[in-house]
């Protein structure tokens, strides 16, 4: 009898410990929804993506694309967020200004890049004169836009402030992002079954403990958006994980969760 009581007590303690661990895990997760304004807490939580495996793969091939296509150094980080993409561009020896729609995200960007100027985008308009920039960088923004009209308006505003013959490089989620067995992401959510263009989809960024809800668009959708905005697509690039890299890639070796568009004005 006494032995049974001890077993029951031990099981109860284990159950309590499990509940505690689960609650801690849940409280550590930042929930980031493209449909909502970002809070100060979300902006701070997003800062954990700086050294993430996802940012590594998304950005790894960008320097070679800049060297191949960009002419001039005057650059706008279009959707700068907390400034990590701005830091990346500064490391490429570019003359960078940032812009974003979120005051809270920009408040973190100013901390991360104290010597860089940032613009607040209001009503889809960047407070910059037309034909200003040699190069526009858009990092993980396009899949935050939930309608054809929003995406095209965003791209048209980029085109407005670009000099003639300048380029836009845009990194966004691929059409495979929500359906593969990634090292980077957990995609096992009911929202990701049978996705159609414009549907909300969900992923969990494992090493940064952030749950993202964004919009699903196919490559064909993006091609159409760039064409409607008046761009010429020069290259579409899918960064793949390599055997000799520091991450134990899974489906990243054969498919990419990201797609990079290089578009000319």
Image (tube, rainbow, N blue to C red):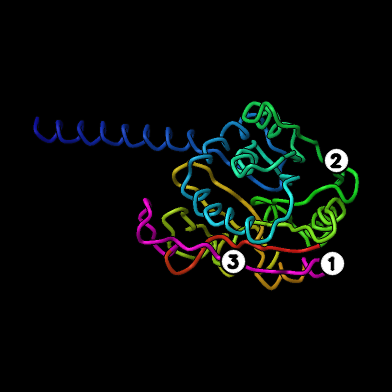
Number of other residues with Cα within 10 Å of mark 1, as a class: few under 14, some 14 to 19, many 20 or more:
some
Say whether marks 2 and 3 touch (CB < 8 Å): no
Instruction: Please report whichever mark, 1 or 3, sits nearer to the chain's N-terminal start.
Output: 1
Rendering coords of residue 54 (x, y %): 50, 50
Say whether marks 1 and 3 touch (CB < 8 Å): no
- The residue labelled by disc 2 is 122
Identity of the residue drawn at 58% across and 38% down: 46
Number of other residues with Cα within 10 Å of mark 2, as a class: few under 14, some 14 to 19, many 20 or more:
few
- The residue labelled by disc 1 is 230
What distance separates the C-alpha of mark 1 from that of mark 2?
22 Å
Instruction: Please report whichever mark, 2 or 3, sits nearer to the chain's N-terminal start.
Output: 2
Q: Which image quarter is the C terminus in? A: bottom right
Is 241 colored magenta in this rendering? Answer: yes
Part of the protein shown in magenta: 226-252
Looking at the image, is mark 1 or mark 2 nearer the viewer? 1
Frontmost residue, 35 versus 52: 52
Frontmost residue, 69 versus 227: 69
Frontmost residue, 148 versus 29: 148
- The residue labelled by disc 3 is 237
Left or right, residue 59 beside residue 220: left
């Amino acid at each position: 009898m006494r032995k049974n009581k001890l077993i029951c007590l031990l099981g109860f303690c284990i159950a309590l410990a499990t509940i505690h661990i689960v609650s801690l895990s849940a409280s550590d997760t930042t929930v980031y929804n493209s449909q909502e304004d970002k809070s100060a807490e979300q902006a701070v939580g997003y800062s954990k993506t700086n050294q993430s495996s996802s940012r590594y793969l998304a950005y790894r091939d960008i320097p070679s694309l800049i060297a191949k296509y960009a002419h001039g150094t005057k650059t706008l980080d279009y959707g700068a967020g907390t400034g990590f993409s701005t830091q990346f561009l500064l490391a490429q020896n570019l003359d960078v200004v940032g812009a974003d729609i979120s005051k809270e995200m920009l408040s973190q960007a100013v901390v991360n890049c104290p010597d860089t100027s940032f613009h607040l985008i209001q009503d889809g308009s960047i407070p910059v004169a037309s034909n200003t920039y040699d190069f526009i960088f858009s990092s993980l923004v396009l899949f935050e836009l939930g309608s054809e009209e929003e995406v095209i308006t965003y791209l048209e505003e980029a085109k407005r402030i670009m000099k003639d013959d300048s380029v836009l490089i845009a990194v966004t989620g691929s059409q495979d992002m929500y359906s593969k067995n990634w090292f980077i992401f957990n995609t096992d959510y009911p929202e990701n079954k049978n996705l159609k263009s414009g549907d909300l989809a969900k992923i969990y960024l494992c090493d940064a403990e952030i749950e993202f809800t964004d919009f699903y668009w196919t490559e064909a959708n993006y091609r159409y958006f760039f064409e409607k905005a008046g761009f010429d697509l020069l290259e579409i690039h899918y960064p793949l994980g390599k055997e000799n890299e520091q991450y134990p890639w899974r489906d990243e070796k054969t498919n990419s969760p990201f797609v990079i568009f290089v578009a000319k004005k």
